[in-house]
Amino acid sequence: MSNKRPAEESASSAAGAPAAKKIAVPYDSLQLGKIYSLEELDLKVLVFQNRKLAERIEQRKKAETELKKRIEQLENRQRTDDAVLMIVNRYWNQLDEDVRVLLQRFDAETSDETETKNESSELTSFLTLLSTWDKQELEEKLGQRVEFSKRAIGKLLQAFDRMLQRNEKLHHAIEDK
C-alpha cells in the first residue's frame, strides 16, 4: 500500500502543531567552477582556506580590540578606585591624628603609647598592604582599624566628659563663694 506513516504516530500532528523545523546554519558555498587538474583543485581549496583564515583573523582582531578597550576601562576604574582609597586613607589617618592631638590637649591618659605608634605605622602602609590581602584578611584588618578609631574617639569623649565635669565643679565652686 502506502509507505507513509499514519497521522496518529506523529506527536506534533496530534497536538495540532506542524512538525518542528530544523534550524538552518548559514555557510558559504564554494563555487569551484570547472576544474581540469588536481593542482587547480588544490589551488582553489587553498584560496578558500586562506579567505576563511583571513575572516577568522579579522574576527580575532575585533575581539582583541574590544578586550583592549575593556582592559583600559578596568584600568581607569582601578586608578579611580585607588585614588578614592588613598583619599579615604588620608582622611582616616588625619582623623586618627586629630583625635590623638585632642587627647593630648585634654591630658587624657592613653593606655598604650606604643599601641598608638604601632597602629600609626601600620596605617601608613595601609594601601600597600591592601592589594596583598585576601577578602577575609581585608575584613579583619579593616575591623581592627575601625576598632582603633572607635577606641580613640571613645577616649576623646571620656576626656571631654571629664573636662566638662571639672568645669561644672569649678563653676559651682565659684558660685558658692
Image (cartoon, rainbow, N blue to C red):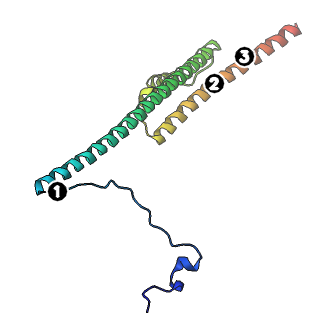
Residue 130 can be seen in this image? no
Q: Nearer the viewer, mark 1 or mark 3?
A: 1
Quadrant showing the C terminus:
top right
148 relative to 129 in the view: left or right? right
Q: Position of residue 106 (x, y in %)?
A: 65, 14
61 relative to 1 in the view: left or right? left
Q: Amino acid at mark 2?
A: Ile
> Which callout, 2 or 3, points at the residue further toward the start of the chain?
2
Q: Position of residue 33 (x, y in %)?
A: 22, 55
Secondary structure found at label 3: helix
Question: Number of marks in the image?
Answer: 3
Disc 3: CA contacts within 10 A as few (<14), some (14-19) or many (>=20):
some
Q: Nearer the viewer, mark 2 or mark 3?
A: 2
- Image marks 2 and 3: residues in contact by CB distance under 8 Å: no
Q: Position of residue 43 (x, y in %)?
A: 16, 50
Q: Residue at x 29, y 42 (%)?
A: 57
Disc 2: CA contacts within 10 A as few (<14), some (14-19) or many (>=20):
some
Q: Amino acid at mark 1?
A: Ile
Quadrant showing the N terminus:
bottom left
Query: Rounded to the nearest whole Å, what is the CA distance between mark 2 and mark 1?
Result: 90 Å
Q: Residue at x 51, y 73 (%)?
A: 19
For mark 3, what is the residue?
A: 163
Looking at the rendered structure, which numbered label has been put on residue 153? 2
> Which callout, 2 or 1, points at the residue further toward the start of the chain?
1
Viewer-proximal residue among 105 and 130: 130
Viewer-proximal residue among 169 and 143: 143
For mark 1, what is the residue?
A: 35
Secondary structure found at label 1: loop
Q: Residue at x 62, y 17 (%)?
A: 103
